[in-house]
Image (spheres, rainbow, N blue to C red):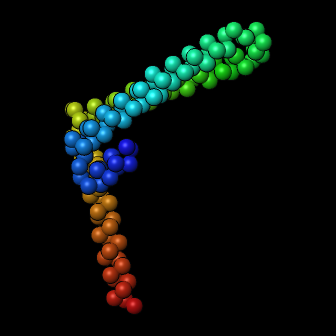
Amino acid sequence: MVNSVIVQDKLNMTGSIYQLVNGVVLLIAFLSVRIVFGIYMSRQAYLSVLPVIDRVPTHLIFVYTAANIVLNGLNLFWFYKMIKMVQRRFKGGASSSSSSSSSSSSSAKGRTEKMKKSALKEGKEQ
């Protein structure tokens, strides 16, 4: 999904309907797997340990709980960032995103042309 966005950017299809559909599918997949299912499984793991919590070392409880909170927090943070990226691409910031994309693609084209010219010069010199 992410690679197709890169390919579409290279083909000057930034902001196309294909990128929108791809972005929405990626958001839905991330939400359902990482957020909903991930938090549900964290809860299930905690509930399965609850009956025997008195036999689990205290440091393991703290480590597992802290790691779980941090990782679920990171999933929420990245989901927020993904939403902002899709909004920036297709709403008000689409022009700045596509202009930076087009400027980077035009500079890449310029570098490619320079490389071709230098290769031609080297070929003529030999």
Residue furthest bottom in the image? 126
Horizontal and vertical percent position of residue 93 = 24, 35
Side of 28 where 72 appears, left or right: right
Q: Quadrant of residue 124?
A: bottom left
Q: Quadrant of residue 11?
A: bottom left
Horizontal and vertical percent position of residue 28 = 36, 29
Is residue 20 among what the camera can see? yes
Q: Indicate whether 24 appears above or below 50.
A: below
Q: Give me the residue at 51% from left, 24% from top.
A: 38
Q: Give me the residue at 42% from left, 31% from top.
A: 30
Q: Give me the residue at 68% from left, 21% from top.
A: 63
Q: Nearer the viewer, residue 96 or 36?
A: 36
Q: Indicate whether 87 appears above or below 56.
A: below
Q: Nearer the viewer, residue 93 or 64?
A: 64
Horizontal and vertical percent position of residue 14 = 25, 46
Quarter placement of the N terminus: top left
Q: Give me the residue at 70% from left, 16% from top.
A: 61
Is residue 73 among what the camera can see? no
Side of 30 where 102 appears, left or right: left
Q: Indicate whether 120 appears above or below 100.
A: below
Side of 75 where 65 appears, left or right: right
Q: How many marks?
A: 0
Horizontal and vertical percent position of residue 107 = 30, 58
Quarter placement of the C terminus: bottom left
